[in-house]
Amino acid sequence: MIPTLDDGALAKRFAQDGREILVDLCARLVEARSPQPVGDTTAPVTVIKAFLEQAGLQPRIVAAMPNKPNLVCSFEGTQAGPHLVLNGHLDTLNAGDEAAWTVPVFQMARNAGRLTGLGIGNMKAGSAALAMAFVGLYQQRSRLHGRITLTLVADEVVFGPHGAAFLLDNEPDLTGDLLINAEGPGFMNLAVAEKGLLWVAVEASAPAGQGMLTRAGASATARLARFLTIVDAWNEERVAPPAGMEDLAEGQHGLRLSVNAGTLQAAGFVSQVATSATAEIDFRVPPGMTIEAIEERLNIEAGRIGGIEVRRIKGWNPNWTAIDHPLCRTVRAASESVRGKPPLSVVRLPASDAARWRARGVPAVCYGPQAELASGLDDYVFEDDVVDCAAVYMAAGLGLCAPSDQDREE
């Protein structure tokens, strides 16, 4: 299941020869606006659909909501084999204050080896590279065993129900056997795991009264502040990697618990005791911890302070695919064949749709051109990374679905 040197060279040549086509596809996707919280993916789906149809493929649209279409496209090899799913998303973050951007927001710029524009890193460049590799694999379909499916979805940025979740619930066949997701963990590393997510609402309450009579720690705001101070200190906690993950790259953020109080609100008047105060907290939980253990700790601290209730908004546990799994080995070898060195195995910090496949028992990895740990203002990717990703996806697909003579003997 390891791609041969010939496969790596073939994939690299295909991607390099198609560089201008790939860059143009990236540009058209940036122009096809799809920012959340609206998350309308109609425009980028139209772009990808036309691209695939021009290559002779027959993509289809699957939608839970008219303005949040998902694109699905599959083809079969000549013999039975694994079902490899290539997955990405087409919705993007919101630009925020567009005046703070130093590059065009909805027009891709190509300068000094960088491609810039809203969503290029998260993750329209990755989706474009997947589509390019999918076309390359389709051209090699006479060599392939099994089935390859491309899913480019909506609603990922907000962890919503209308994208990959809808596809997997309504078309179980799309679960497949193996998944490569183009959500880069940053720096062209290979994410074999990702943190769990826990969102909680915290509500502090206190009896009404005159502010001039308040005692230390008695108001709802003081109780909530004390609670948040305790929880914020958990930010520096780290864990040892679980079994099968001992070879994770050292010194990375992926094994650290992160805690962020994203919203705060209190009710009352400045001279009155605040009778209620609320916060919403985002935890990203590393492999080796569980969200249930975090909730237990939260409830203990709430009980010590008093007048505090904690309620889960949503959450799921960290998940991973063992570093020595054939999928991880194959993608790592494909990256080495294209780029000359293997990627580091890391934990991805933000959540991705790969977690939805792992939750169904499907081995999954994330590999993509996102340049840093997370995309943001002046979102960018390196052009060469995007081209390399297309080659790596294609080489990995050949390694997984076009067995060599040695693989057949084994």
Image (cartoon, grey):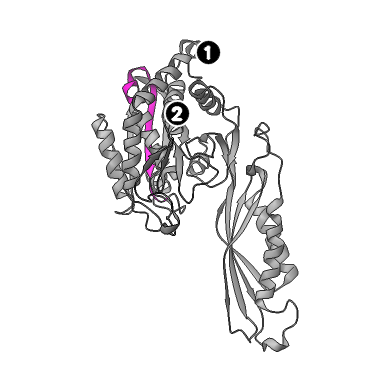
Please state which amino acid type lies under the numbered disc 1.
Answer: Glu
Q: Regarding mark 1 in the picture, which secondary structure is present there?
A: loop
Tell me the residue that label 2 is attached to.
388
Q: Amino acid at mark 2?
A: Asp
**373 relative to 113 in the view: left or right:** right
Distance CA(mark 2)–CA(mark 1): 30 Å
Q: Is residue 51 above or below residue 116?
A: above
Observer able to see residue 4? yes
Q: Is residue 139 magenta?
A: yes
Find numbered disc 2 in the image and state the secondary structure of the residue it sits on.
helix
Q: Are marks 2 and 1 in contact (CB under 8 Å)?
A: no
Q: In this image, 9 relative to 227: left or right?
A: left
Residue 287 in view, yes or no: no
Q: Nearer the viewer, residue 291 or 102?
A: 102
Give the percent coordinates (x, y) of residue 125. 40, 39
Find the magenta span and give its range.
138-155
Mark 2 vs mark 1: which is more N-terminal?
A: 2
Q: Residue 60, relative to residue 336: is it above or below? A: below
> Which of the labelled discs sits on residue 374, or is there none?
none
Instruction: Kindly identify which numbered label has been placed on residue 410.
Output: 1
Q: Residue at x 41, y 30 (%)?
A: 387
Q: Position of residue 409 (x, y in %)?
A: 50, 10
Say if 316 sits above or below 276 in the image: above
Residue 328: image quadrant is: top right
Neighbour tally class for label 2: few under 14, some 14-19, many 20 plus, Cα within 10 Å: many
Rendered image quadrant of residue 97: bottom left
Task: Residue 212: say if magenta.
Answer: no
State the residue at coordinates (42%, 19%).
402
- Relative to 149, does residue 402 appear above or below in the rendering? above
Give residue 142's position: percent from left, percent from top: 33, 18
